[in-house]
C-alpha cells in the first residue's frame, strides 16, 4: 500500500510531512512520487498567506475524482489551514477521511492507525518493507508553536504556544536520521533559537547535536533576532559542524513598521547583530524575509527597507506581499490596494536580486566544500546550491571551484588543490575549538 504527500508552505511543514510519512512507513506503507499508485493522498496545508491556502483548497477539491477512481482510497488533510478551517473543510469536502490540524501533529501516530484500520477493502494490503529516508540533508523539529504575536501572523493561532522537545528526543532523532544516511541536520522551530528545556538553551543544543557521530553539518531555521545571543554567535563561530550561513527574518527596515508588527527589535539592533556575526564568521552568508505593503507602510518606511537591504547586502531573501489573515490584529487595519503592494514587491525584488547577483559573481574562482545531495547538485556550507560537473554521487563531500555564478544555482568543478577559502576557515575553526 502506498501513500503520496503534497506539502505546501515552510520547512516546518516539510518536516511535519516527513514525520507523518514515517508513521505510515512504520505501519508498512511505502511512499510514492506518483499519485496514481497511491492509496492515501496526504495534503499538508499552509495558511500563512491567502495564496498558499487557496492553492491547497483547489488541490483538495480535485481529489474527489482521484478518490473515486479506486476503491479504498483515502484523503488526509493536515497542517495549518486544516487547523484554521477544519469545520469548513469537512463541510465543503465530505469525502475527506481525516482532517488533522497543525496543533495535533504530535498525535498523528494514533490517528494514522485509526485511519488504516478503517479500510473498506483488503485489496491493497500488500505491505512492503518500511522504506528508509535516504536524504543527505534532514530536518529535526526541536520545538512547535510560537510565543510571539507578530500582528500580521496566523502561526501562533494555528500552531499554538511553544512546546519544546527534550534534548534526548532531539538527539535520538538526529542519530536516527544520520543512521538513515543524513550528513546534515537542520533544526527547526518558528523561533528556533528561543529553544529551552530546563537549564538547557539553544546554544547547548547546537553543541550537543554537533557531537552526533557521522554528522557533518548543522543548520537551523527560523531564528528570531531577539534570541541571537552572544552565546549563540560564539557557538556558531566555534563549533565546526555549525554552518556559517543564517536566514534571519527582518520583515522591515523601518522602526515604525517593526513596532506595529510587534517584532521586538529595532533596525539598529538587527544591524548590530549582523555586524557582530560577520566579525565572528567572516564569509558567512545572510538571508532574510521581508514583508512589503504592511498596513500603514509609507513610502518613507518602504525606503527604509530598501536602504537596509543596501546596507546589509543580503545574499538572498524572500520578499512577501502582505496578506491579510483573518483573526490577526493587523486584519483590523486598512490594507493597501493590490497594485501598490505589487509595485513595492517588484522594486524590492529588483534590488535584492541585483545585490544577490553581484555577490554571487564574486564567488567565481573561490573554492568550497560541497555536499552532494541529489544528482550533481549539492550545497556549500554557506548554503549556495552548486551544480558540480563530473563524476560525483550523493553524499560526496568535495572541494569545488566555482566556475559560473550567473544563476542562483552556481556551477563548479572538482578542485584538487589543498588550501581553500572555505576549508581554510574550517581548519582554523577546528583548531580554535579544540584549544
Ligand atoms: N517564525 C519565523 C519568523 O518569525 O521569522 C517565520 C515564520 S513565517 C511562516 C515565514 C515568513 O512568512 C515570515 O518571516 C514573514 O515574512 C512571512 N509572513 C508571515 N505572515 C505573513 C502575512 N500575513 N503576509 C505576508 N507574509 C507573511
Ligand atoms: Fe509568526 Fe512572528 Fe511567530 Fe514568526 S515569530 S511565527 S512571524 S508570530
Image (cartoon, rainbow, N blue to C red):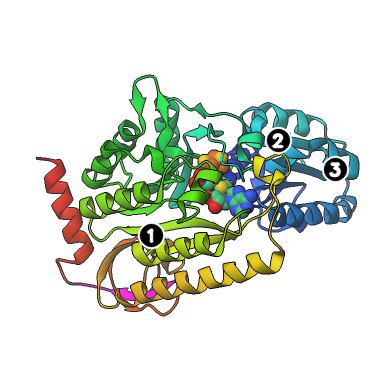
Residue 415 in the magenta stretch? The answer is yes
Q: Is mark 1 within 8 Å of ligand 1?
A: no
What is the magenta segment's predominant secondary structure? Answer: strand
Quadrant position of ligand 2: top right
Label 1: how many Cα within 10 Å (few below 14, some 14–19, many 20+):
some
- How many labels sit on residues? 3
Q: CA distance from mark 3 to mark 2?
A: 23 Å
Q: Is residue 65 left or right of residue 134?
A: right
Q: Earlier in the sequence, mark 2 or mark 1?
A: 2
Which quadrant is home to the C terminus?
top left
Q: Residue at x 50, y 50 (%)?
A: 256
Q: Identify the residue position indicated by label 1 in the image.
A: 383
Q: CA distance from mark 1 to mark 3?
A: 43 Å
Picture coordinates of residue 57, whole percent (x, y): 79, 52
232 or 131: nearer the viewer: 232
Picture coordinates of residue 89, whole percent (x, y): 83, 42
User: Residue placed farthest to the left in the image?
Assistant: 435
In magenta, the rendered stretch is: 409-416
**Mark 3, secondary structure of its residue:** loop
Q: Which mark is residue 72?
A: 3
Q: Are marks 1 and 3 in contact (CB under 8 Å)?
A: no
Amino acid at each position: 500500500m502506498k501513500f503520496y504527500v503534497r506539502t505546501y508552505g515552510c520547512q516546518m511543514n516539510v518536516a511535519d510531512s516527513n514525520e507523518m510519512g514515517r508513521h505510515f512507513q512504520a505501519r508498512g506503507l511505502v511512499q510514492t512520487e506518483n499519485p496514481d499508485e497511491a492509496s492515501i493522498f496526504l495534503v499538508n496545508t499552509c495558511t500563512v498567506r491567502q495564496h498558499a491556502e487557496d492553492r491547497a483548497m483547489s488541490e483538495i477539491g480535485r481529489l474527489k475524482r482521484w478518490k473515486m477512481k479506486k476503491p479504498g482510497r483515502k484523503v488526509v488533510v493536515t497542517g495549518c489551514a486544516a487547523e484554521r478551517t477544519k469545520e469548513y473543510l469537512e463541510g465543503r469536502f465530505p469525502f475527506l477521511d481525516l482532517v488533522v490540524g497543525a496543533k495535533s501533529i504530535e498525535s498523528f501516530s494514533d490517528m494514522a492507525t485509526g485511519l488504516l484500520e478503517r479500510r473498506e477493502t483488503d485489496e491493497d494490503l500488500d505491505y512492503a518493507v518500511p522504506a528508509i529516508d535516504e536524504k543527505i540533508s534532514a530536518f529535526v523539529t526541536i520545538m512547535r508553536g510560537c510565543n510571539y504575536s507578530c500582528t500580521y501572523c496566523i502561526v501562533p493561532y494555528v500552531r499554538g504556544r511553544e512546546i519544546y522537545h527534550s534534548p534526548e528526543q532531539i538527539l535520538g532523532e538526529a542519530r536516527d536520521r544520520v543512521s538513515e544516511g543524513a550528513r546534515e541536520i537542520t533544526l527547526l522551530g518558528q523561533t528556533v533559537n528561543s529553544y529551552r528545556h530546563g537549564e538547557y538553551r539553544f546554544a547547548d543544543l547546537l553543541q550537543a547535536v554537533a557531537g552526533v557521530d557521522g554528522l557533518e553539518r548543522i543548520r537551523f531555521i527560523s531564528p528570531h533576532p531577539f534570541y541571537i545571543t552572544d552565546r549563540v554567535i560564539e557557538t556558531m563561530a566555534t563549533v565546526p559542524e555549525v554552518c556559517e550561513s543564517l536566514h534571519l527574518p527582518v520583515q522591515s527596515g523601518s522602526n515604525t513598521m517593526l513596532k506595529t508588527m510587534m517584532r521586538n527589535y529595532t533596525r539598529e539592533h538587527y544591524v548590530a547583530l549582523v555586524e557582530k556575526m560577520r566579525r565572528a564568521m567572516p564569509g558567512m552568508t545572510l538571508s532574510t524575509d521581508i514583508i512589503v505593503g504592511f498596513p500603514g507602510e509609507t513610502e518613507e518606511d518602504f525606503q527604509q527597507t530598501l536602504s537596509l537591504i543596501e546596507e546589509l547586502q543580503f545574499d538572498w531573501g524572500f520578499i512577501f506581499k502582505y496578506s491579510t489573515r483573518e483573526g490577526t490584529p493587523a486584519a483590523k487595519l486598512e490594507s493597501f490596494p493590490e497594485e501598490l503592494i505589487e509595485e513595492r514587491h517588484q522594486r524590492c525584488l529588483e534590488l535584492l536580486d541585483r545585490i544577490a547577483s553581484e555577490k554571487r559573481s564574486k564567488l567565481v574562482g573561490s573554492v568550497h566544500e560541497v555536499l552532494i545531495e541529489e544528482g550533481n547538485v549539492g550545497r556549500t556550507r554557506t548554503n549556495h546550491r552548486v551544480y558540480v560537473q563530473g563524476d560525483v554521487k550523493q553524499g560526496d563531500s568535495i572541494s569545488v571551484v566555482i566556475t559560473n555564478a550567473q544563476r542562483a544555482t552556481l556551477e563548479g568543478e572538482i578542485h584538487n588543490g589543498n588550501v581553500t577559502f572555505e576549508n581554510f576557515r574550517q581548519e582554523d575553526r577546528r583548531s580554535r575549538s579544540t584549544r
